[in-house]
Amino acid sequence: QVQLVESGGGAVQAGGSLRLSCAASGNIFSINIMGWYRQAPGKQRELVASITSGGSTNYAGSVKGRFAISRDNAKNTLYLQMNSLQPEDTAVYYCNAAVLSGSYWSNHWGQGTQVTVSS
C-alpha cells in the first residue's frame, strides 16, 4: 500500500504565502512524476505543477512565477511554495504521484488540503 499525506494548507490574506508538503510512504521502490492539483468549488480538478524525478518542472500559466514545486527524493516528499496568493487560488490542493511498487506502476492521490485566500 502507498499513502500520500498532505500538510501545510490554511487560510491567508491575498499576497500571503503558504508551503504545502506531501509525504509518500508505504511500498515504494521509486517515484516518477509527482504533481500538485487543485479543485475549487464547482470546478474541475486542474494541474497546478508537476516535477519529474530528475527535477524537470511544469507549471500552469496561472501560477507561473508565483509558485515553486520541489521534491526531496530521499524523503519521498513533495513541496509547493506558494507566494503572492490570490483569492482565485482558493481550492483543495491534492498531491499526486506515479509510484513503482515491486514490478508495477500505480497512480496515487492524497486526501487533499484546503487553501483559502481572502481579499
Image (cartoon, helix red, strand yellow):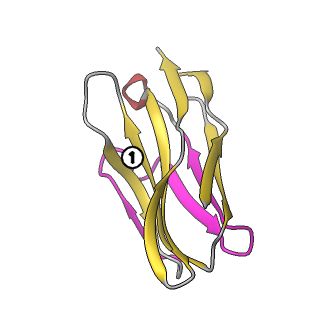
> Is 23 left or right of 39, judged from the image as shown?
right
Q: Position of residue 56 (x, y in %)?
A: 45, 76
Q: Residues within 10 Å of mark 1 (few under 14, many from 20)?
A: some
- Give the percent coordinates (x, y) of residue 40: 35, 28
The image quadrant of residue 76 is bottom right
Nearest the eye: 32 or 54: 32
Secondary structure state at the residue bearing disc 1 = loop
Identify whether 65 is placed above or below 51.
above
Left or right: where does residue 60 sit relative to residue 100? left
In the rendered view of the protein, which quadrant contains the N terminus? Answer: bottom right
Q: Position of residue 62 (x, y in %)?
A: 32, 44
Q: Name above or below for residue 21 compared with residue 31.
A: above
Above or below residue 112? Residue 33 is below
The region drawn magenta spans 55-83
For this orientation, the residue located farthest to the right is: 75
Residue 73 is covered by the magenta coloring: yes
| Residue 92 can be seen in this image | yes
Residue at the spot 48% in from the left edge and 57% down from the top edge:
108
Q: Amino acid at mark 1?
A: Val
Of 95 and 25, the residue lying toward us: 25
* Residue that numbered label 1 is attached to: 63
Reply yes or no: does residue 5 show up in magenta.
Answer: no
Q: Residue at left 62%, top 54%?
A: 3
